Image: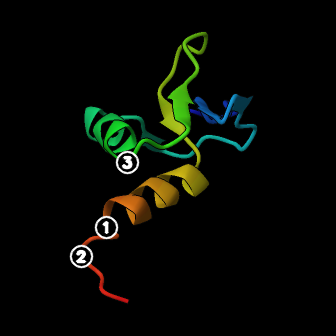
Amino acid sequence: GSYGQSCCLIEDGERCVRPAGNASFSKRVQKSISQKKLKLDIDKSVRHLYICDFHKNFIQSVRNKRKRKT
């Protein structure tokens, strides 16, 4: 599993140090990142694609912003 691994994302040039959860960086996630022009990138040096819960929720909330009218 992803035990002991940290999130594979780089946010605004800084590697995320949060522990990776069981969510993985999928093509869909990648698409929403580029569509929304988020300052998120994947660390090419890591051999896994697991992201932390914080970024998983962050990406999901960004993706869902259109549906919810606040």
**Image location of residue 15, percent across then percent down:** 71, 30
Left or right of 21 on screen, residue 3: right
Q: Are marks 1 and 2 in contact (CB under 8 Å)?
A: yes
Instruction: Please identify, in this view, whether the residue under mark 3 or under mark 1 is nearer the observer.
Output: 3
* Distance in Å between CA atoms under marks 1 and 2: 6 Å
Q: Which residue is mark 2?
A: 67
Three-letter amino acid code of the residue under disc 1: Asn
> Could you say which disc has been placed on residue 64 in the image?
1
Left or right of 18 in this view: 44: left
At a point 38% along the width and 89% down the height, the residue shown is 70
Q: Residues within 10 Å of mark 3 (few under 14, many from 20)?
A: few
Q: Is residue 36 left or right of residue 27?
A: right
Can you name the residue that lies furthest to the top here? 45
Is residue 22 visible in this depiction of the protein?
yes
Place residue 30 in its image quadrant.
top left
Q: CA distance from mark 3 to mark 2?
A: 15 Å
In this view, the residue farthest toward the bottom is 70
Residue bearing the label numbered 3:
36
